[in-house]
Image (cartoon, helix red, strand yellow):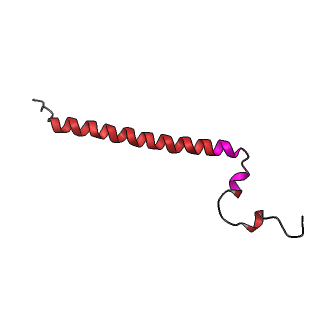
C-alpha cells in the first residue's frame, strides 16, 4: 500500500484554516470577556430586569406613592 504525498495547496489551505480558527476563537473570547465585565459591573442581579431598554409598567414608580 502506498501513501499519497500531500500537495502544497492542501498545506496552504490547512494553514489558512488554522488562521480562521484563531480569529474565530479570538472573537468569541472578546465577546465572552465583554459579557463577563458587563455582568460584573451590574453587581446586583435585580438590575438585569431593569436594563432591557423596554418600558415596563411593573417596575415604574406608581403615581401618588411618592
Against 42, residue 66 (above or below) is below
Is 15 positioned to the left or the right of 59 in the image?
A: left
Does the magenta run of residues contain 46?
Answer: yes
Q: Residue at x 71, y 48 (%)?
A: 45
Q: Residue furthest bottom?
A: 63
Q: Residue 29: image x %, image y %?
A: 49, 40
Q: Residue 62: image x %, image y %?
A: 84, 67
Where are the magenta residues, as a range? 39-49
Against 24, residue 60 (above or below) is below
Q: Residue at x 15, y 33 (%)?
A: 6
Q: Residue 5: image x %, image y %?
A: 12, 31
Is 20 positioned to the left or the right of 6 in the image?
A: right
Report the number of numbered marks: 0
Does the magenta run of residues contain 16?
Answer: no
Q: Residue at x 74, y 51 (%)?
A: 46
Q: In the rendered image, which quarter contains the C terminus?
A: bottom right
Q: In the rendered image, which quarter contains the N terminus?
A: top left
Principal secondary structure, stretch drawn in magenta: helix
Q: Residue 55: image x %, image y %?
A: 69, 67
Which quadrant of the view contains residue 26? Answer: top left
Q: Residue at x 67, y 43 (%)?
A: 41
Amino acid at each position: 500500500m502506498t501513501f499519497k504525498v500531500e500537495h502544497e495547496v492542501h498545506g496552504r489551505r490547512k494553514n489558512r484554516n488554522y488562521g480562521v480558527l484563531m480569529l474565530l476563537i479570538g472573537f468569541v473570547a472578546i465577546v465572552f470577556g465583554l459579557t463577563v465585565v458587563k455582568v460584573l459591573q451590574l453587581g446586583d442581579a435585580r438590575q438585569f430586569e431593569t436594563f432591557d431598554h423596554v418600558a415596563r409598567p411593573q417596575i415604574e414608580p406608581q403615581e401618588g406613592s411618592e
